[in-house]
Image (cartoon, grey):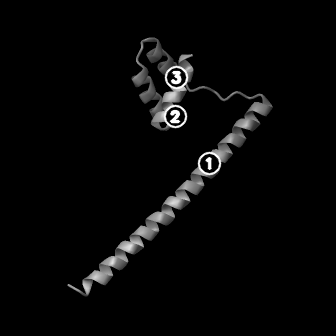
Amino acid sequence: MDSLLPGIALLLISIAMVASATDRRSKTLERRLQRLEKKVDLLLAHAGVAEPEDPRMAEIDELLTQGKKIQAIKVHRELTGSGLVEAKEAVERRMR
């Protein structure tokens, strides 16, 4: 039993290191993606090109006219893959 403890400890440390490295890489990639999205948005604005709106956005507008804000947020999240806070803010912008 005593000979197993160092092996288990080493395994747990290895798993923690891999998880930490993966998390750092994920955050780095996410920051790069956000920068690229901003650049594309700037290029589209400069060129005067409007991003085509997904037809399901009309579904969100319809839900909002019915007073179904939570359902509209759910549809927005499904459509865009955004997080809860981002979807809530976007839906509230559409309400204005």
Does label 2 or label 1 sit earlier along the sequence?
Answer: 1
Q: Nearer the viewer, mark 2 or mark 1?
A: 2
Indicate whether 42 appears above or below 3: above
- Which labelled disc corresponds to residue 86? 2
**Residue at coordinates 42% horizontally, 12% vertically from top-left?**
66
The three-letter amino acid code for the residue at tag 3 is Glu
Image coordinates of residue 78 in percent, x first then y, are 45, 33
Label 2 – label 3 distance at C-alpha = 10 Å
Indicate whether 64 appears above or below 84: above
- Which labelled disc corresponds to residue 33? 1
Are dots 2 and 1 in contact, CB under 8 Å?
no
* Extreme-left residue of the structure: 1
The three-letter amino acid code for the residue at tag 2 is Glu
Does label 2 or label 3 sit earlier along the sequence?
Answer: 2
Number of numbered discs visible in the structure rendering: 3
Label 2 – label 1 distance at C-alpha = 16 Å
